[in-house]
Image (spheres, grey):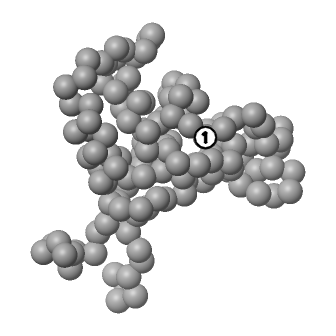
Amino acid sequence: MNKFAAFGVSDEGISRMTFVNPNTDKPYIDKDGKEAWIDVHHFHGPEGRAFDLANERKPINPRPGFTRENSYNIAKMAALTKAWYLVGADGEPIANMPCNETIAAELYENRWVFGQVLVHATAYVNFTPAKLNGS
């Protein structure tokens, strides 16, 4: 057990992010009322650290229009993405879009999507169970 576990902060597990339309600041919702979502591991959690260790010596080929650092972070976030339910602005589910690393990286080339997911995946509050002691 981590000697600092008493702080009650976790970076483990998977967290579901509600996928929000940046033009309305409201979730994308299908015609049945189901919200769009993306499931991710914490960016700095065990899976994120494993990605860093596995890739620390590999050359980074930047994606067109992106810096090496941003390209690395897109690849890392894509590897940490585990599942999704995507819905378009018309309320239709986005079909034929399996959740895998390649398609996730393509999705995250949309900076507004990547920004949402990265913010969610780096917030410890999204991975830490609520405490009952009123804190």
Residue at left 62%, top 47%? 84
Q: Is residue 23 shown above or below 17? A: above
Q: Residue 10's image quarter?
A: bottom left
Residue at left 31%, top 54%? 45
- Residue positioned most to the front: 54
Q: Is residue 123 shown above or below 43? A: below
Q: Answer with left or right where residue 83 lies relative to residue 49.
A: right
Q: Residue 5's image quarter?
A: bottom left
Count of number-bearing discs: 1
Q: In front here: 24 or 47?
A: 47
Q: Of helix, strand and loop, which one carries label 1?
A: loop
- Residue positioned most to the top: 64
Residue at left 52%, top 48%? 82
Q: In front here: 106 or 24?
A: 106
- Residue positioned most to the right: 31
Residue 25 point in image, percent of width and height? 63, 46
Q: Answer with left or right where residue 105 lies relative to residue 123.
A: right
Residue at left 34%, top 27%? 72
**Residue 124 at least partly seen:** yes
Q: Answer with left or right where residue 125 lies relative to residue 82.
A: left
Residue 15 point in image, percent of width and height? 49, 59
Query: Which residue bears the numbered disc 1?
Result: 99
Q: Is residue 78 shown above or below 12? A: above
Q: Quadrant of the C terminus?
A: bottom left
Crowding near pointer 1: few (<14 within 10 Å), some, many (20+)? some
Residue 131 point in image, percent of width and height? 38, 82
Q: Answer with left or right where residue 30 lies relative to residue 61.
A: right
What residue type is disc 1 on? Cys
Q: Residue 96's image quarter?
A: top right
Q: Quadrant of the N terminus?
A: bottom left
- Residue positioned most to the bottom: 133
**Residue 25 at least partly seen:** no
